[in-house]
Amino acid sequence: MSASRPAAPAERVPAERVAVPAGTTCADAVATTKLPATGPNAIIAVRAPDASVRDLSWVPDHDVEVEPVALSSPDGLNVLRHSTAHVLAQAVQDLFPEAKLGIGPPIENGFYYDFDVSIPFQPGDLERLEARMQEIIKAGQKFRRRRFSSVDEANTELANEPYKLELIDLKGAVDTGEVMEVGGAELTIYDNVDSTTDKVCWSDLCRGPHLPSTRLIPAFKLTRSAAAYWRGNEKNQQLQRIYGTAWPTRDALKEHLRMLEEAAKRDHRRIGEELDLFTFSKEVGKGLPLWLPNGTVIRDELEQWARQTERKLGYQRVVTPHITKEDLYYLSGHLPYYEEDLYAPIEIEGEKYYLKPMNCPHHHMVYRARPHSYRDLPYKIAEYGTVYRFERSGQLHGTMRARGFTQNDAHIYCTYEQAKDQFLEVMRMHDDYYRALGITDFYMVLALRDPKNRDKYHDDEGMWTTAEQITRDAMEESNIPYIEDIGGAAHYGPKVDFMIRSATGKEFGASTNQVDLYTPRRFGLTYHDSDGAEKPVVVIHRAPLGSHERFVAYLTEHFAGAFPVWLAPEQVRVIPIADDLLDYAATVRATLLDADLRVELDTTDNRLNAKVRAAVTRKVPLILVLGRREQENESVSVRDRSGKEQSMPLAAFVKHAQDLVRDKSLDGAGHLRPVAPGVKGNP
Ligand SMILES: [Zn+2]
Ligand SMILES: [Zn+2]
């Protein structure tokens, strides 16, 4: 699982280049162009020929051409957000002089900064910090880069910042995706300089780049604070992290805050509890969800859909055990390399057994259990298989990231000649599933080898070339947009991840797929070809609906709990307006149950309005209100999610509801409501 993702397709538009003569600043060169110096498209940095982003104050030692970086471009936003993190840190040390500095990188849509303080920040503190930050921004402090001439010099100047000292010590061995402080060719510090007196107000160890001035921060907000361990390790000191966001315009900030609010409303952890989909219990353990009856309905419906889809495509189902002897994982290579991702082994009769972290090795053993001829291929086996992986408690997030989960898993064993079409079929399957669920915003990421880092990957060059070729051919033919992630491949081959965006713009890795030529050799997975020769198969790994835990979490946020009728745990609520109508209501309920619909009858003596409200709160898609007239005509009054009411004969309603289920209709589902046209979570 790679931590950082490349930007989604078509976000980086290369700008015109600007020539910078040796010995002069990029700022001077940019000033000779017509490019803006203020506003959302202000040029605030440059991209050097080596692809690094640099300050406008950079003075190249030979003539170069640079690409101007605008504030609202993806690179520009990173610079803006990270510079705002500096302003935050300065404000924190102004108001809390004892605070020690951790790290402060830009993140998706914002930034954070970690601080060692004796008392955690309170909500009121964030307001005070914002006010101080506004003053710093108004003052228009300049960011000025200064190079340390030696490590000793840096250590002396930063003697009061123990965390920065540690980073200097680690220089070269840190993840530069997160740590902005060090990792460049030089060790540098940025001074915040008063624009009138030229006096240094504050400094921070950093490799940059930054905005030329704090005045170029148009709009920001501190969003929350939380505890975080130094360098993400729970054995380390606990620090306090402040999160914030910054945008090129006030409107963009406002839109982002609205989106955050919507995301909070759609949070699957909140809706999951409110609609009784799942729960967690201290006694059962962290990251191990208990699926309640309502959530189980959704799982069952998804599973049935997958089974039907797969059966038509020639998949057969298998069942494999949850615990397995260590021998299998030595064969698969999970041991000893991935031991830390597994739960500690259980010892039985002197042998070690592990909880299974994935289904693949078991499926390979199923394939191997019988000889196969070319006539059997493709051989497709599927299982909703439950797996367990050890995730750090800090990484757990509702059911989105859990320690036990059940995957929509399957493996296709086929010949090399069949592999492209089989992989294409898998891609089309994703496409069909997503469209049926109203998920239209998705793309693929092709994870490839990093040619500069060959040790990470197996060394059979021919195998890499073939796997990449098959994968790419299928991707091209699928017409689904994709981007490449160099260095994201697994040890044994390239991967294709499907990324989908939720209604609030959040990006979500839905499934990982692979054309695997490596494992068949390791496991000895072969077939007898028509010429009598024994040949290795290709294995295709796929799980289009991911795991129930992650996918239902995603769908809950996607639909804001207002699931389409076919997935809704309760499809119909029957509400009689008076007690003497209970008999008719019971008849209606029985008719609907017979028609295979999920129906509940409200027998409380609440007022009609309260009963309707209760059903609306539970997000029941179809509410039937029964009065005397309905009883006389054997009809029902139907209220749908839009609030529209219409009367129809009971038999007509049964057909209507069945049609909605059969067609997997999205009528009234909650996947479209909040997003203004053209607005996405990412800039
Ligand atoms: Zn910095
Ligand atoms: Zn697999």
Image: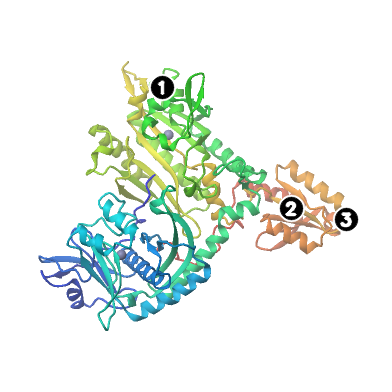
Q: Is residue 271 visible?
A: yes
Task: Report crowding for label 1: few under 14, some 14 to 19, many 20 or more residues within 10 A (C-alpha).
Answer: few
Which amino acid does the dot numbered 2 rest on?
A: Arg
561 or 321: nearer the eye?
Answer: 321
The residue beneath circle 2 is 573
The residue beneath circle 3 is 579
Residue drawn at the location 14% of the way across and 70% of the way down? 20
Which amino acid does the dot numbered 1 rest on?
A: Arg
Residue 255 image position (x, y, % from top left):
47, 69
74 or 1: nearer the eye?
Answer: 1
Give the distance between the C-alpha atoms of the residues marked 3 and 1, in whole angstroms. Answer: 66 Å
Q: Is residue 564 visible?
A: no
- Quadrant in which residue 618 is drawn: bottom right
**In the rendered image of this protein, does residue 575 appear above or below residue 253?**
above
Query: Considering only order in the chain, which callout, 2 or 1, is on the residue closer to the N terminus?
Result: 1
State the mark number for residue 375.
Answer: 1
Quadrant where the C terminus is found in the figure: bottom left
Dot 3 falls on a residue whose secondary structure is helix
Query: Considering only order in the chain, which callout, 3 or 2, is on the residue closer to the N terminus?
Result: 2
Residue drawn at the location 61% of the way across and 51% of the way down? 272
412 or 109: nearer the eye?
Answer: 109
Give the distance between the C-alpha atoms of the residues marked 1 and 2, in whole angstroms. Answer: 52 Å
Is residue 159 shown left or right of residue 293? left
Is residue 649 shown left or right of residue 276? right
Q: Is mark 1 within 8 Å of ligand 2?
A: no
Residue drawn at the location 27% of the way across and 53% of the way down? 169
Task: Report crowding for label 2: few under 14, some 14 to 19, many 20 or more residues within 10 A (C-alpha).
Answer: many
Q: Is mark 3 within 8 Å of ligand 2?
A: no
Residue drawn at the location 59% of the way across and 48% of the way down? 664
Residue 84 image position (x, y, % from top left):
37, 69
